[in-house]
Amino acid sequence: QMIMSLGLSQIKNLKVGGPVVTFLLGELSRHLEILFSNGSNSKKKPFLSKTSRCITPAPLLSLFEHDLMENPYAESGQDSILQSENNDNNNPLYSPSFRKITLVLQTYINAGVFAALHENLAALAEIRGGRVSDEDGDDEDEEGEANGHNRRNQNIDNDANTMTCTAFLLKSVKAITATEELTSNDIGRTYLFAVLKQLAEGDRDESVRVIENENNLMSVPSFTAGRHKVSLPNILKLLFDVFELVEEIATGGEMYDLDFVMQGVECLEAILNCVVRVDVARNEEGSLGPTGTAITSAAAAPAHLNSNADKSRDVSMLRNKMSKMCHHLMQRTWSPKTSYGKKNIGKIVALYVEHSIVEIPSDYREAAAEEDVYRLGRLNALNNVTKQILGELPNTHRCKGPVDGYPTCCYQSFNSYFSVLMQYFPIELKYIYGSSLGQNTQSHDAVAKLLEGTVILIDLVVAAFEIIKDNPLYVKRPNLLAEVKEGTKFLDVFVKHAVPFLQEQFQQYEETVVDIIKRIQVGTRYLQNVILHGKRERDEVLGREIPKAKKVLEMFIHKIKVLMKKNNCLTALWGGNLKNKNIDGSVVEDESEDDELLMQDNPFDADNDTVGSDSDSNTVSYN
C-alpha cells in the first residue's frame, strides 16, 4: 500500500534490492528449483542452517518484516522430513518426495515468504511503470547538470538491482507454477492455493488456515475419502492475478534488454501452463464451480468465472493475451547488441503461434458456420508469419531486413522464425482433421470448411518453401533441415489423415480434391529437389532425414494411386521421370553422376499398383 501511494517522482528514486536482499532472493529461487527438481538435487543441504539469523537493515524489512527475522528459507524440520518418509507410504498421492515438498512449502507459508514475494512483485510492477513516465520529463533540475548526472548514475545502479531482484523473483514464481506436483492431485492443489493466496494477494492468514485445515484432515485415517477440496475456479482466479502482475513487470517500461524480458516470458509461460492444467482438472470434475465444500471462506466460485461477463478471465482469452503480448514483442526494437536465436525470438514466435489458436467448436455446425476460415485454429497466425513477416524479408535491402513493422525479423533471425513456422504446419493439419470438422463427413458445410482449411495450409507450406527456393541467401543447412524434417511430417499427416478423408469425399468434391492433390505436388517436388541437393552435397545432417522423407514420399504416391483407383480414375494419372533440379528449380546441367541417385528416388511405377525402389518414375500427375 505504501508503494502504491508513492508518486512517480518518488518511485523513480526508490531503491530495490541490495546485497542481502539479492542474496536471499537468489538462494530462495535456487532452493525452489532444487525442491521441484524431482529429487535430482535432493541431497544438497539447505543454504543456511535452521538457527542462522539475518541482521536485517531497514530496507529489508519490507521484504521479510519482523516475523521473518529467523531465517524462513532454512528447511526447518529437516530431520522430521527424513523420518516421515518411512511413514504413510501406502498413500500413492503422498510419496516421500511429495511429502518433502509439502513440508517445505508449509514452512514457507507459515513464515509468509510468498506474501513477501507478492509485496516485491507489486512494488516492481509500479516501479517499471513509474520510470517509463519519468522518461518523458526533464532529467535536469535547477541545480544543474552535475546533479542530473549523479541522479542518472543512481538510476542505473537502481535498475541493475531491480533487474537482478526481478530475475530471482521470476525464477521463484516459475519454479512454483511449472511443477506438476501441485496440480496433479487435491493435496497438491491445496498447497498451490495457499501459495497463490500469498503470492497473488499477500494474504498470509488465509493461506495458513488452509494448511492447518489440511494437516488436521491428514491426521484422520483415510483422510482422502470424502475430503474437502479447494475450489478450482479460486485457484484459476489467483493464477490470473499472478499472470497480470508478472506481465506488467515483463512488458512494462521501455526495456531494450531482450534477455531480461525473456525471463518474464518464460515465467508467464509457466503460469499459463499451470492455468491449463488446473482448467483440465476442473473440466474433468464436470463442474465450473467448486467440486465440494471448499476449505476456504470463499466457498463459491468467483462470479466472473461462472459467467461470460468478464471474458478476460477465460482461459482461452488468457492464451490469446499471451499470443498478443508475444506478437507485440516481435514488433519491438531491441538493443543493437541483441543476438537473435531460438531461445529468445524463436521462443516468442512459437508462443505467438501456439496461443493464437481459436479453438474449433465441438459442435461441427457452429464450426462450419464460421465465415472466415482464418478464425479457426492457428491459420491466421501462420498466414501472418508466412506472408506478412517472412514473405516480406526478401523485399528488404539485400534480403537481410529488418522487415518493416517487425524489427526482430532479419537475416540473423530468419531460421528462428522459419523453423517455428515449419513445425506448426503438421501440428495444425492434424488439429483441424481431428476437430469436429473432420469427424462429421456427412455435413456439406463442415466438409467444405475443412477442405478450404486444407487448401490454405498447403498453400502456406508451398509459400514457405518458395521463400528458400527463390532466395539463394537463405539456402542454409538449418533452413533446409527444417524443410525436410517438418515437410516430411506434414506429408505424413496428410497421408494418414487427409487422404482417407479425400477418398471418402472424392465423388462429391472431385474438383476440389484434385486441386488439393495438384497443390501438394508442388511441395513434394520441391522436397525432392532438397533431398537431391543434400545427396549432391553429401550433407550428413540432411542425409539422416532422407530415408524417412523417401518413405513418406513413396507412401504418398501409393495412397494417391489407390485413391484414384477406388474412384475409377486411375487412367487419369501418368507417371514419369523428374528432372534432376537444383533447389531454385533450375535443371542440373551434369546429370550423369546423379542418375543413380535419382533412380533410387523413383518409387512410383505407373504400370502397376506396387511401390518399389527399382521404379523408373517419381511423380504422379492428374490429367
Image (cartoon, rainbow, N blue to C red):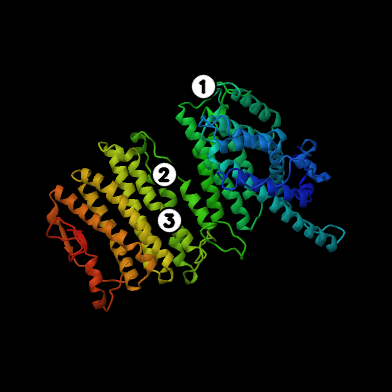
| Residue 477 appears left or right of 45 | left
Identity of the residue furthest to the right in this view:
143
Residue mark closest to the camera, 3 vs 2: 3
Residue mark closest to the camera, 1 vs 3: 1
Amino acid type for the residue under numbered disc 2: Arg
Amino acid type for the residue under numbered disc 1: Ala
Q: Earlier in the sequence, mark 3 or mark 2?
A: 2
Quadrant for residue 61, please give it.
top right
Question: Residue visible at 69% across and 53% down?
Answer: 163
Q: Secondary structure at mark 2?
A: helix
Gap between marks 2 and 1 measured at Cα: 45 Å
Residue 225, numbered circle: 1
Quadrant for residue 591, please give it.
bottom left
| Residue 220 appears left or right of 277 | right
Which residue has dot 3 on it?
421
- Nearer the observer, 533 or 42: 42
Gap between marks 3 and 2 measured at Cα: 18 Å
Q: Secondary structure at mark 3?
A: helix
Residue 360, percent from left and from top: 39, 39
- Nearer the observer, 488 or 243: 488
Residue 332, percent from left and from top: 58, 57
Which residue has dot 2 on it?
375
